[in-house]
Amino acid sequence: MKLSLSVRVAESPKRKDITDIPIEHLAPLAKAAGFQALSMRASVVSINSSPDRIMAVRQLLKRENLDVSMVTGDIPLAANNANATDAIRNISPYLNLAEALDCRLVRIMTHQESDIILVQEAADIAAKRGITLAHMTHWGTLIETVDDALRVVGEVKRQNFGIVYEAANTMVCSEIFDPKALRLLVPYLVNVMFQNVHKSPNSPIGFLTNRFGHVGLRYVPLADEAELSATAMIATLKESSYNGWVTVHQPLRDSQTVKEAILEAASLFQPLIR
């Protein structure tokens, strides 16, 4: 397995359009902490960024010897708002951004059954450019649970379409972590992401799920195993011979600096990955 850090580490839970520090400071911190790649989001660079900006980010990452594990090309994808499915309706700008960053994995989103055919068409376009489309297990989409993911993979039927497993999202949608279920999903995984949350009905932070409506939550330390266990997840992936990206995807907690968040992620996940 390869260890990646999402630039979400520099975002607050409520803001997905800006980072607390610039990528010029974030990338060296990630490299120094031992990460091999950054998962790029629109808070840093997007399909709307200028070619000069995109090139500057690529050159920075090249200097730091950091790969780009995945590209989330616009704010709607990150926020999962009404425009989150724009990518599957016009995939080319997202592929262009990925290629410019030397990345082979592009995140997409679905909201309704009719989106399946759009995913198929987008995947066919991406396949000609050697790029894989990735759909996260995510609240408010066609893929809220592992069973949902297996169903959608079976319907899309494209070799360059895969799943990003994110345990917090499946837990929010009332699916307790199940090693057996994750093993079933491993053949279709193109990335694994981890953030740690507790359900918290009175929290101002929450997700609008298809299954249960609004679910409140709060972010907790990555090593907290009360509701989610990074240790159990990585152990299952190792047993299943998964050898792809593992990406820490947690935003800043209250009063936490970006450097503290990066070191927290590295101290937990590096020993687990080794």
Image (cartoon, grey):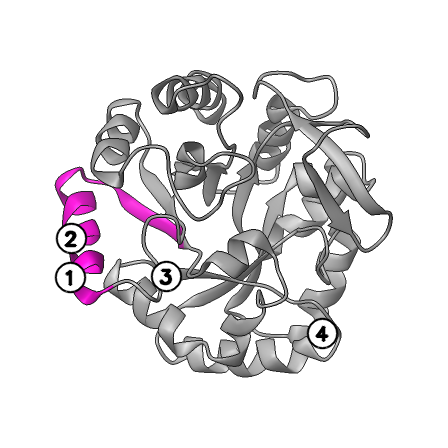
Identify residue type, mark 2: Ala
Question: In 3D space, how far apart are the residues under numbered discs 1 and 2 (Cα atoms)?
Answer: 6 Å
What secondary structure is marked by label 2?
A: helix
Q: Is residue 138 above or below residue 196?
A: below
Q: How many marks?
A: 4
Secondary structure mainly formed by the magenta segment: helix
Identify residue type, mark 4: Glu
User: Which quarter shows the N terminus?
Assistant: top left
Question: In 3D space, how far apart are the residues under numbered discs 1 and 4 (Cα atoms)?
Answer: 39 Å
**Foreground mark, 2 or 3?**
2
**Residue sitting at 77 percent across and 58 percent down?**
148
Question: In the drawing, does residue 23 fall left or right of residue 112?
Answer: left
Identify residue type, mark 1: Asp
Identify residue type, mark 3: Arg
Q: Is residue 25 above or below residue 53?
A: above
Q: Which residue is mark 2?
A: 56
Q: Which residue is mark 3?
A: 104
**Dot 4 or dot 2, earlier in sequence:** 2
Task: Say if residue 53 shows up in the picture.
Answer: yes
Q: Are marks 1 and 2 in contact (CB under 8 Å)?
A: yes
Question: In 3D space, how far apart are the residues under numbered discs 2 and 3 (Cα atoms)?
Answer: 19 Å
Q: Which residues are magenta?
A: 50-70
**Dot 3 or dot 1, earlier in sequence:** 1
> What percent of the width, then of the height, locates residue 132?
45, 66
Residue 67 colored in magenta in the image: yes
Question: In 3D space, how far apart are the residues under numbered discs 3 and 4 (Cα atoms)?
Answer: 22 Å
